[in-house]
Amino acid sequence: MLYEIGLNIIPTATDFVDLMSQKYQVSQSGVWYTLKKLKKEGIVDFTEKGEVPRPLGLTEFGMKVIRSRVTDVEHRHYHHVTMVAKV
């Protein structure tokens, strides 16, 4: 299963790279490098030259990674709030 990023708002990896490059004023090559690294790690999937077209999306593994990071952040925030409240 693949979780499409942007629900057709950002249909391709190229559109994503363009958006990130403009929004955060970083080089397109840097965004491509990071995106390709995430693809190699199995976190995202997208069409590269010569491949069957498919949307930019998170893989199931990518969703697990995102969920674990959100849980970690929520846990740290809760722990911090709890510790502050005890003081």
Image (cartoon, rainbow, N blue to C red):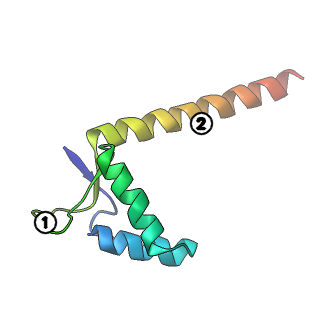
Q: Element at badge 1?
A: loop
In primary-sequence order, the first of circles 2 and 1 is 1
Image quarter hosting the C terminus: top right
65 left or right of 40 in image: right
Position of 43 relative to 77 (above/below): below
Residue 1 in percent (x, y) is at 18, 43
Q: Nearer the viewer, mark 2 or mark 1?
A: 1
Residue 41 in percent (x, y) is at 33, 43
**Quarter occupied by residue 46:** bottom left
**Quarter occupied by residue 19:** bottom left
What crowding class fits label 2: few (fewer than 14 Cα within 10 Å), some (14-19), or many (20 or more)? few
Label for residue 37? none
For the point 41% across and 76% down, which residue is it? 18
For the point 47% across and 66% down, which residue is it? 30
- Three-letter code, disc 1: Pro
Residue 12 in percent (x, y) is at 27, 69
For the point 28% across and 55% down, which residue is it? 57
Q: Element at badge 2?
A: helix
As measured in the structure, the alpha-carbon distance from the residue carrying label 2 to the one carrying label 1 is 35 Å
**Quarter occupied by residue 14:** bottom left
70 left or right of 17 in image: right
- Three-letter code, disc 2: Val
Residue 40 in percent (x, y) is at 30, 48
What crowding class fits label 1: few (fewer than 14 Cα within 10 Å), some (14-19), or many (20 or more)? few
Front position in the image: 64 or 40: 40
Q: Residue furthest right?
A: 87
Label for residue 53? 1
Residue at label 2?
73
How many numbered circles does the render carry? 2
